[in-house]
Amino acid sequence: MHGRKKNTQGEQQQNNNREKMPENLCPADTTGNCSKYSQLHKFAPDLNPEGNYMKKTLLITSLCLYVAFSKAQMVKVFYENKDQGFVIYADNYELYPVSFTFSFNLLNLYFSGSDKKVYVIPPKRERFRIGELTPLRIGDQTKFSYNFKTAIGDVTVKKYDTSFAYDLPFQKGKSYKVNQGYNGTFSHQNENALDFTMPEETEILAVREGRVVQIVQNNTESCPQEECKKYNNFILIMHPDGTFGYYAHIKYNGSKLKPGDHVKQGDVIAYSGNVGWSAGPHLHFACFLGRFEKWQTIETRFKINKGDSVVVLKEGNDYMRDY
């Protein structure tokens, strides 16, 4: 995660270069737009004493989410020399796909891929081949640099299950109010998210099956200001259609799961709380698709009453689960 840079004198030559790659940290912001933080990387292979090219790596961290996750997306981008030129690879250490794009500056090099292409690295994949850089004129100086941006999930997913009937996220026989709905004025502007008012330590149930890809549950701080969203405890579950379910403000150590677990619709996953950006005990839920600039939160339809009615939940209404 920490790159190093060593200054050199003179031009960067393919046959005489000692520059180390600089570090790149892409900090989170309220929009989740990492692209404006992308830094330009200029690097070329080192020569070891035997004159062979040494492998070098770059570890990229990116917090490209509209809520400040406490854990960065971990993607290691590196290159290895080939007979003429370089091969670029990436490792994804996450339990979810990570999407990213490159924009290259090249001197006497040709990139076999496309700087317009979106690369989607599958979960827990190593040595994902990005492409090759090949010299245009053998023996001449080569140099390259690039910008990048990353996003959680597969940003190429356009279609998802719009007809899916989600379960209410609480136990049978319970009824809770949607205190803030889609595009709510407190914290849901331009966002399809729901806040269910409920006492702390209420059992939270999975609204849909999926795989647990991230858990944060070590925070205790809370306040009604946006500055406290960095303290949000949450569970993130990836659904079969590529969407994600985000359950926030769970209590300290309130998860009943671990990353990698598969959950079924209706499983108990956590206990509600009042942690992070919160004006009172509640559960915040959003379903979204990963995008480069900001999550694309989507409307979801829930089964209510005995499960025979499926509706879009409205702010201010109480909803009973009797199934």
Image (tube, rainbow, N blue to C red):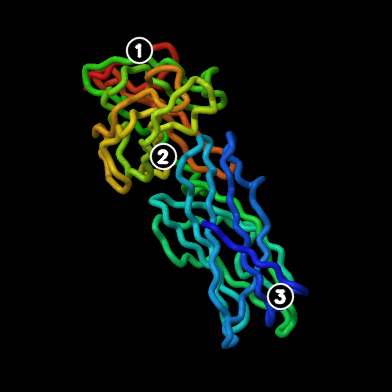
Between the residue at mark 3 and the residue at mark 1, the CA separation in whole angstroms equals 65 Å
Identify the residue at image location x=60%, y=57%. 23
Q: Residues within 10 Å of mark 2 (few under 14, many from 20)?
A: many
Question: What is the quadrant of residue 7 in the picture?
Answer: bottom right
Count of number-bearing discs: 3
Question: What is the quadrant of residue 268 in the picture?
Answer: top left
Kind of element beneath mark 3: loop
Q: Picture coordinates of residue 314 (x, y %)?
A: 43, 16
Q: Picture coordinates of residue 235 (x, y %)?
A: 36, 37
Q: Residues within 10 Å of mark 1 (few under 14, many from 20)?
A: some
Q: Nearer the viewer, mark 3 or mark 1?
A: 3
Kind of element beneath mark 2: strand
Kind of element beneath mark 1: strand
**185 or 289: nearer the eye?**
185
Identify the residue at image location x=29%, y=44%. 258
**79 or 232: nearer the eye?**
232
Left or right: 298 as drawn, with respect to 30: left
Q: Picture coordinates of residue 82 (x, y %)?
A: 56, 80
Rendered view: 322 above or below 126: above
The kind of residue tagged 2 is Phe
The kind of residue tagged 1 is Asp
Residue identifier under label 2: 244
**256 or 155: nearer the eye?**
256
Mark carried by residue 142: 3
Residue identifier under label 1: 318
